[in-house]
Image (tube, grey):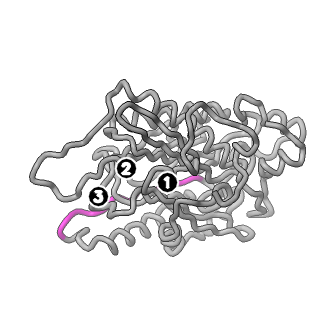
Amino acid sequence: MYGQKRIRDYGITIGSLETGKRNAITDVAGVKVGHSTLSKRSMQTGVTAIIPHQGSLFKEKLIATSYVINGFGKTMGTIQMNELGTLETPILLTNTLSIGTAADAVIDYMLDHNQEIGRSTGTVNPIIGECNDMVLNDIRARYIEKRHVFEAMESASTDFKEGTAGAGTGMLCYSLKGGIGSSSRKMEMKHGDYTLGVLVLSNFGTLGDLTVNGNAVGKKLISLIGETGEKKDKGSIMIIAATDLPVSDRQLKRIIKRAVTGLSRTGSIITTGSGEIIIGFSTATRIEHDKPHDHLSIPTIHEEDIDIAFRAIGEAVEEALLNSLVTATQVIGRDGQTRPALGDLLEKYDIQL
């Protein structure tokens, strides 16, 4: 995507399952991703929008849930989503202090597209996630405006930029430049072939822990360049998982819990100051907003089929996170702060992964 050099271009193959065509969350049919990127001096931030399908999300909701590995993070809308098991808006990612602005914009967007909200039916439940970009971005300036949220949603496409883009513009990961990364896996079953895709907003970890396909790359980099920033992990990661696998919200929660296996293989120990939050949805079934005359019929896989999905999400999260690192580009942000990009270091020191 976008001609960026990704982890597979370094000769690294993560896991055993085959990827989708783009090796991205948008391999799940109907899913699109858009960015609004703000990058100028102390302004290093942005918005990323995940559009789950191209119909009316409010009128045709999707099976959805979330899971918290470590709760040092902020989200909006996940309580109702977990209670009802459905998603009815785009998912927006931004910086910590811009959650309110993002929510206001999504509400405006949904009201504009659904005249019945707040009149003949109930209200709407926006889903917003965040990470803290205050090292590179002047987060107190609150640069994000509603127009940036609209730009992210309206620019959504099947191809999108990774690394230093959208909500990932000012993020750090393993003491290096982090940001947006994505990957996907195919799942072959007797009753059909399915896809699971992941998008991450990476902003956690310390350099010494970074592991690439079992290789202690972080320790090797420290021996060459020394530490690149604070040794204490104060960041977070937002993980968005999409699939066309027919599952219940209970089964989906079981699947997204396994995102932790992918995180751990990159070196994460899930520190106290790091928030690890996963939001997942399935496009396989659309739940009509208006109550039908008959009962709902929702197809789900048998529990014995689920292990391949457990493997898929672990592999996709691991690769998406590594893609967020190798596609990221260095920026000089607030007070001249900066962090190196992994791709630049690999080239400079001729490090083989």
Q: Nearer the viewer, residue 111 or 333?
A: 111
Identify the element where label 2 is drawn: strand
Cβ atoms under marks 1 and 3 closer than 8 Å: no
Residue 80 visible (yes or no): no
Q: Above or below — where is 183 with respect to 156?
A: above
Identify the element where label 1 is drawn: strand
- Give the amino acid type for the residue marked by disc 3 in the picture: Glu
Horizontal side of residue 259 vs 344, given as left or right:
left
The numbered mark at residue 60 is 3
Q: Quadrant of residue 113?
A: bottom left
Horizontal side of residue 189 vs 24, given as left or right:
left
Tell me what residue is drawn at x 34 percent, y 40 percent: 246
- Give the amino acid type for the residue marked by disc 1 in the picture: Gly
Q: Report how far apart the C-alphas of labels 3 and 2 lie in the structure.
A: 10 Å
Tell me what residue is drawn at x 53 percent, y 40 percent: 185
Let me know if residue 202 is in the magenta part. Answer: no
The magenta segment is 120-131
Q: Report how far apart the C-alphas of labels 2 and 1 lie in the structure.
A: 20 Å
Sequence-wise, the earlier of marks 1 and 3 is 3
Q: Position of residue 174 (x, y in %)?
A: 71, 42
Nearest-to-viewer mark from 2 and 1:
2
Q: Quadrant of residue 247?
A: top left
Sequence-wise, the earlier of marks 3 and 2 is 3
The image quadrant where one finds the C terminus is: top right
Nearest-to-viewer mark from 1 and 3:
3
Q: Position of residue 56 (x, y in %)?
A: 32, 64
Residue 131 visible (yes or no): yes
The residue that disc 1 covers is: 129
The residue that disc 2 covers is: 283
Identify the element where label 3 is drawn: strand
